[in-house]
Each structure stands twice: as structure tokens, then as C-alpha cells.
Amino acid sequence: MQPMQANSLELTPVTAVSPLDGRYAAKLKPLRSSMSEYGYMRARVQVEVAWFMALSDAGMEQFKPLTPGARKYLLELVKNFSLDDARAIKDIEKTTNHDVKAVEYWIKGKFDGRPELQAASEFVHFSCTSEDINNTSHALQLKACREQVLLPGLDAICNTLRDMAQKFAEVPMLSRTHGQTASPTTVGKEFANVLVRLDKARAKIAEVPLLGKMNGAVGNYNAHLSAAPDMDWEAFSRNVIETPEPIGLGLTFQPYSIQIEPHDYMAELFDAVARSNTILIDLSRDVWSYVSLGYFKQKLKEGEIGSSTMPHKVNPIDFENAEGNLGLANALLRHLSEKLPISRMQRDLTDSTVLRNMGVALGYAILAHQSLMTGLGKLQLNEERLAEDLDAAWEVLAEPIQTVMRRYGVQGAYEKLKEVTRGKTVQAADLHNLIRGLEIPEAEKERLLAMTPGSYVGKAAELARRA
């Protein structure tokens, strides 16, 4: 088959190189407004506008405070920033071959017919290096992504796990340490285990401060002080960065930098996201295993096919998709967290192209969150299969029996139980005969005789409800 001419293929869901913009494009719509090129441009406009408006209040004779009408107009440039505006900036970039300068020229172009703004146009991008705009824009992108998409996705998973922990708190389940039968737990307790871990990971993601710097070409306010030596530029920069949106940026001020913000906070954030992803990989694999054991059935979807040749199959594809995409996310996030804090001397450009993949790394995680939610929503507990498994594993009661024996000083308790149970198929009668012959109080014998694998769950139900 002859390949089509490359220039004849327009960008569509089936021609996109990245599956995030192709096969999974519809699922990642919520990410586009913040982490796309459009989102990056909009953030740059927001930074330039915030800096420009603040400069008008800085007390410089040459730039009087802007009128309320001018401020309203500027804020609307950000609020109403459209795809056509982004395309216009890209058209300017074809000439400038510089994306930040293209934003500056676009803003100045929006001053046409407004004498007040035209007179102050040279204060757009005043004393700024491109990285003053870029680093704060990246922080704004991450802020929006974290608040609007990432944390809500994790919250949805946590809420589902919490519901399952409560609902199945008392449903006994055989544990399988090393893949072998082990002391029973409850289904709810196993979901509670993941919930507690994920809650902590979610909190770490939420608490990472998003930093920004606006201090010039090498972080020393050189150009700023050459223009206005009596002005406290550090305080001015802090004010722009930390004043809440939309007047300021609502970020955390970074006082020390080279030309670029050091990106340590990004590494911290991406590591925190990767940690949550690792927890979810663990969940995906465990649920996959429980489905394989028959502990869960999956709701059928009309028309869905599990295998091209085996019609009976209902595969746990959502958990497999989640695991795969979480792995891709972590590979990218770890590269970002290892690479971004490193820059040769005061500046090199290796971070620039890497930073454009923040949305890709987070996109794979967010795609996995959706797969997990779909998969968890399909699960149907098979209590009959759980009960069968427990009833075939009486050997797990060797632990409580030998522990009671040791309490009452029976010598060689562990060894006696090992002789009866290790590598053998154990029946209830085998254990009951042993219990009746023990030199322990009768009340303890009766308690042990009443015990079953399904009742030997310790505090599992209580712990599940408490999560």
C-alpha cells in the first residue's frame, strides 16, 4: 500500500500523531483550555496585562494610572481571549520568529484607536525578559490544570473508593500474600487502604506552592533599576505575582533566580503527581487480579466485544488502560522533574521544549483517572465466589489457633500447626480435632471452634468504615 502524501493529511482524530489529540481527544477536552498552546498564549497575555496595569500605578511620571475604562478593556482582553486571538498571535510569530514578542505586538495592536493606551504602549513588556512572562505563564497553566482537572479527577476516585470501603466494609475476602492464601480481610478494608494512601498523595499535590519570578535577564532587576533606580522593584514584582487574579497572578513570589525560575517547585509537583500515579497503578493491578479470581464481575455494555475470537470474554480493559497510561505519565513526569531544575549557568534552552510537554505528561494521568472511574463503575461484587474461596482455605485459621496456644503457654504451638497445615489441603475437621485436644480453657476452645475463615477478619470492617 502506497502512503498518502504527507501534506494531504489534515489534522484529525485519525491523523494526529499523539493519541491524546487523536484517539483520546474527546476525553481530554477539559485540559485544552489550560495546557494547550492556546492556554499558554492566554496566560502570557494575562501576565503582560497584569504587569502593564501595575506599572501604571508605580508612580512613574511617564505612565500615569490607567482609567477604569482602560483597565476594564485590558482585563477583557484576557477574559475574552479566543482561538482567533491565538491564531492572530501565531501569524505575528511567523514574522518575529519569537513567540513572546508576538504576544507583545498583539497587545500593542489592541491599543489601536485608544489614545490612552497607545501613549503608554512602550510599557508593555517593560524591563521584562521573555522568561519573566514564560515562567509565570507556566505556573498559571499548572494552577488552572491542578484546580480544574487534576484534583477533581483524584477527588472523584477518592470518593468512589470511600463509597466502596463503606459499602463492602463487612464483606470478608481471602487475602493472598505472595499470591498464597493468607489471613482474611474485607473487601472494604482493601479499598480503604488505597483511599488513605491516595488522600495523602492528593494533599501533597494540592499543597505545592506555584512560584513565579519577574526579575529580568539574570534575576537581578538590572534593566529595572537602570530605568527607575529609586523604585523598589522587588516589592513591585512580588505584588504583581502574589496579588490574586485577575488584577495580579495569584502565585507565590520566587525571590532568587537566574534567567529562569529554578523549576524546583515543578519537580516537587510532578513527583507528587507521579506518587499518586504509582498508588493508582497498584490499585489497577490488584483489581485486575480480583477480577481474574472472580471476586468481581463486570457490568456488560451492549455491543462491546472482549475478544475478536473468544466471544465469552469480558476483559478488565479499563484497569489495563489505566495502568498503561499511568506508566506513560510517570515516565514523562520523572523526566520533567529530573531535567527542569538543571540549567547551564544563567540560561540554556533545554527546558523550553521540555516544558511544552507538561500537558502531555498530565494528560496521560488524567486519561488514566477516567479509565479507572469507568472500571470501578463496572464492578459487581461476586460474594458467592468470595465465600467459596474462604470456605476452601481453612488453613488460614492456623494463625489464630497457634497464637491462642502461645498465650496459654502451649509449647511448640507454631510447629504443631505447621505440621497440620503446611502444604496441605486443610478441612475444618482437621483443625477442630486439634483444638479439642489442646490444654487451654474450654471457653477459648469454644471460641476457636466457632471461628471460620469468613469471621476471622480482625478490625477490618472498623478500619474500612473509619477511612
Image (cartoon, rainbow, N blue to C red):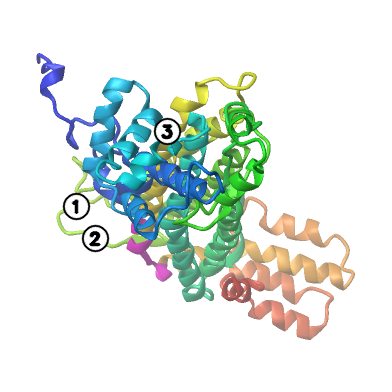
In the image, is 450 to the left or to the right of 454?
Answer: right
- Residue 269 painted magenta: no
Asked whether residue 35 appears in the rendered view, the answer is no
Q: Residues within 10 Å of mark 1 (few under 14, many from 20)?
A: few
In the rendered image, the quadrant that contains the C terminus is: bottom right
In the image, is 459 to the left or to the right of 42?
Answer: right
Q: Position of residue 215 (x, y in %)?
A: 60, 35
Q: Nearer the viewer, residue 75 or 144?
A: 75
Q: Amino acid at mark 2?
A: Leu
Query: Which comes before the other along the chain, label 1 or label 3?
Result: 1
In the rendered image, the quadrant that contains the N terminus is: top left
- Identified at 52% across, 35% down, the residue is 132
- Identified at 67% across, 68% down, the residue is 431
Q: Nearer the viewer, residue 310 or 41?
A: 41
Asked whether the beta carbons under mark 1 and mark 3 sit within 8 Å of each other, the answer is no
Can you identify the residue that label 1 sits on?
A: 304
Distance from Cα at disc 3 to Cα at disc 2: 36 Å
Can you identify the residue that label 3 sits on?
A: 357
Asked whether residue 75 appears in the rendered view, the answer is yes
Can you identify the residue that label 2 sits on?
A: 300
Q: Nearer the viewer, residue 232 or 154?
A: 232
Asked whether the beta carbons under mark 3 and mark 2 sit within 8 Å of each other, the answer is no
Distance from Cα at disc 1 to Cα at disc 2: 8 Å
Q: Quadrant of residue 455?
A: bottom right
- Residue 376 painted magenta: yes
Q: Amino acid at mark 1?
A: Glu
Q: What segment is highlighted magenta in the picture? A: 374-384
